[in-house]
Image (cartoon, rainbow, N blue to C red):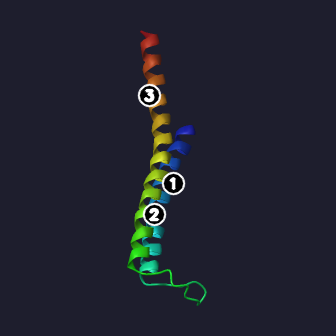
């Protein structure tokens, strides 16, 4: 049962990373096109703002996704180490 939850978490992390990437791209294009909020244009759009959102958002997605996959990788390595130690103890 534990493996089911860990495997589901790995799939969920992948989905979250993809959704975050899509959100960053949409936000960058929205800023590039100068989309204001609530019908009021605050003058914060343009290609430079879109590029800045794209770069900072991509870095954010890399960090968040990287740390989530790092945690899952630590779990997998610990599991493999425990299995190897059990094999060595049974010899």
**Dot 3: what SS?**
helix
How much space separates mark 1 and mark 2, taking CA atoms?
20 Å
- Give the mark nearer the N terminus: 1 vs 2: 1
Q: Earlier in the sequence, mark 2 or mark 3?
A: 2
Disc ID at residue 12: 1
Above or below for 79 versus 59? above
The 10 Å Cα crowd at callout 2, few under 14, some 14 to 19, many 20 or more, is: some
Q: CA distance from mark 2 to mark 3?
A: 34 Å
Res 54 quadrant in image: bottom left
Name the mark on residue 84: none
- Picture coordinates of residue 57 (x, y %)? 45, 63
Say if 51 sits above or below 62 in the image: below
State yes or no: discs 2 and 3 in contact (Cβ < 8 Å): no
42 vs 86, left or right, is right
Which residue has dot 2 on it?
Answer: 57
Q: Nearer the viewer, residue 51 or 14?
A: 51
Q: Nearer the viewer, mark 2 or mark 3?
A: 2
Location of the N terminus by quadrant is top right
Kind of element beneath mark 1: helix
Do the residues under discs 1 and 3 have CB atoms within 8 angstroms?
no
- Front position among marks 1 and 2: 2
The residue sitting at 47% across, 17% down in the picture is 86
Residue named by callout 3: 80
Residue 4 picture location, percent across and down: 53, 43
In terms of sequence position, does the residue under pointer 1 or pointer 3 come before the other?
1
Split into 4 quadrants, where in the image is the C terminus?
top left
Residue pictured at 45% horizontal, 38% vertical:
73
Mark 3: few, some, or many residues within 10 Å (few <14, many ≥20)? few
**Residue shown at 42% from the left, 61% from the top:** 58
């Amino acid at each position: 049962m534990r493996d089911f939850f860990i495997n589901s978490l790995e799939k969920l992390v992948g989905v979250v990373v993809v959704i975050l990437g899509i959100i960053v791209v949409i936000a960058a294009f929205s800023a590039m096109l100068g989309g204001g909020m609530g019908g009021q244009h605050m003058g914060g759009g343009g290609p430079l703002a879109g590029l800045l959102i794209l770069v900072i958002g991509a870095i954010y997605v890399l960090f968040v996704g990287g740390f989530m996959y790092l945690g899952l990788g630590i779990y997998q390595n610990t599991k493999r180490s425990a299995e190897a130690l059990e094999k060595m103890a049974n010899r």
